[in-house]
Image: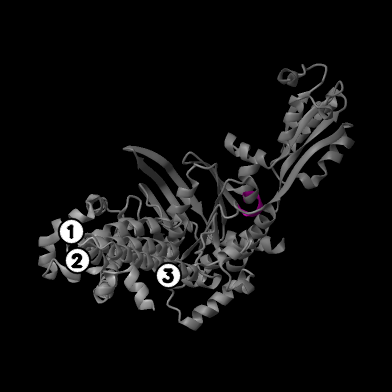
Amino acid sequence: MTSFSKRRGAGLEDRCMSEEASFIQLKQVTKSFHKDSRAIEVLKDVNLEVDQGDIFGIIGYSGAGKSTLIRCINGIESLTSGEVILDKQVVSNLRGEELRRFRRQVGMIFQQFNLMPSRTVFGNIALALRKSGLSKPQKEQRIMELLKLVDIEDKRDAYPSQLSGGQKQRVAIARALANHPKVLLCDEATSALDPQTTKSILRFLKDLNQKLGITIVMITHEMGVVKEICNKVAIIDQGVILEQGDVFTVFSNPREPLTRTFLETTSNLSKVNELIRINAPLVQLNEGQIIVKLTYTKTTVSEALISEISRRFYVDVNIIASDIEIVNDMLLGGLVAILSGEPASIEQTLGYLQEKNVSAEVIKDARSSHQEISAECV
Amino acid sequence: MLDQVIKKFLPNVSKVSDVFYESILETLKMFAIAGSISFLLGLFFGIVLLVCKPGGILENKWIYNLLDKIINVLRSIPFIIMIAALIPLTRLVVGTAIGTTGAIFPLVVGITPFFSRQIESALSGVDPGLVESGKAMGMSAFGLIIHVYLKESIPAIVRATTITSVNLIGLSAIVGVVGGGGIGNFAIMYGYQRSQVDATYVSVIALLIIVSMIELLGKRVLRNTKYY
């Protein structure tokens, strides 16, 4: 944890130093493909800013344009209009050998790993070092260094088909890092891996980010990935960036419905809605009780909120679901609870919660003065 | 003893056995020379087709369409007619239109379009993801061709070469019809024109053996180029 906060501190300094220009900038990027004489706009006026040391997640459904977006950063996709600037180099202006030299400065890993099947692990990494200008022994030394870094030294002479998915991705990472890149692009890098391997690869990427200070831009459709390691996020849908910013800010205060939808994919709070819909025993209320969904928007959880409510307002709090995660050292999420007590105390409680920056949404109400609103849904 | 068996079963061929051996050598010579030339040309045109194709790494509609059409036209002409049609050109290029020397040029023209297509399809089998990762590594088009396309499709190229070689043996026998020399020529001269059935059968067996050897060799090479 401490090293992580240190890194965040370092990131902050970098941000101050390069206040006028971010490390990676996408300015009004548009991209359209022509198909049967019709132009299809894949990216529409995309603006992104990634700072040095960020782990920047771009999340969206398949077909949202995120693959195209990440390929604009290393110039594999050309732009229809707009500008991509990486470390003061205007990528969209680079041509020929300049562009190829630039690409060696940007590592990329893929969902399907894309290792050359006819080459050994060693050969695959050596391929990335072909134009590095290193001598043969230097190359060999560098490859052994990389294999050690990704912790698969013993697989040096194995062919990709003899490796597991996680090992393949580690080789791919080693290959991507061969030329000491400042940026690592991850194209759904963990989508083909099982949950456990996903976790270890993500942890490894985070380690790299801290140890080497490498900036990581990753696209994914999995909310879990973003929550696990990213410090910034952008939500993309149909070629448009809906919102972007600090992971905690975006997720604690989602402005767009799609952001909320993504949040719900990893949250079990939404399950309560389903329970209410089928009127499950767990959510059946007695007279005077309500079900509230509490969502933390600021880091107030440490304030022993629940006990406070019980003591102050004589309200019983029965927590039926909770989903609180640590994102960027801050608590994110909320819980669903049944509150029972005097109608006046419940009113007071809700007011108090608002004061404490906890959003409280009444999702089922059995107070006598109110209709049971959710009953209509049944 | 063996001599007598040969004389009994091959009454005609046994009298001209040296002509027969000579014809085998001629076939092998045509195969080797025409094969090597078409291998290089086919590889070249196959690569050109691949990279110029729509969506290829050096997309070029004009070159692709032109080459594509030429190959289609050449492939649709029956080989025996092509040989006749090529005679003036053959004379111009190699000086003669008959014998093994005269046969090599039409063989090259006949087999190269087929081989080019085979190479194109072999190279097309390379996973586009590999090409993309090559691009991301900063490879040039030339680098991609050598280190990704060719390197990753060696087994497919070996297979294509085997199929093409067998086809080439077939074509080299057809060349015999128009005085091209080789086993085909022997079969026509003795087996067909003089109705010496044993000459025809011996020719068939000789061709069969050559084809089997090519396939065996192809399999051997394939086994050695396969990785795990």
Hey, what amino acid is under mark 2?
A: Gly
Query: For residue B51, which numbered disc appears in the image?
Result: none
Q: Residue under label 3, please give it.
A: B217
Secondary structure mostly seen in magenta is helix
Question: Foreground mark, 2 or 3?
Answer: 2
* Residue B226 left/right relative to A6: left
Q: Is residue A148 above or below residue B116?
A: below
Query: In which quarter of the view is residue B147 placed?
Result: bottom left
Q: Is residue A168 visible?
A: yes
User: Could you tell me the amino acid type at mark 1?
Assistant: Ile
User: For the C terminus of chain B, which image quadrant?
Assistant: bottom right
Q: Secondary structure at mark 3?
A: helix
Do marks 2 and 1 share a chain? yes
Q: Quadrant of residue A95?
A: bottom left
Q: Nearer the viewer, residue B188 or A285?
A: B188
**Picture coordinates of residue B11, whole percent (x, y):** 29, 69
Dot 2 crowding, Cα within 10 Å, few <14, some 14–19, many 20+: many
Q: Earlier in the sequence, mark 2 or mark 3?
A: 2
Local secondary structure at mark 2: loop
Please report the bounds of the magenta region as a residue range: A226-231
Mark 2 — residue?
Answer: B180
Q: Chain of mark 1?
A: B
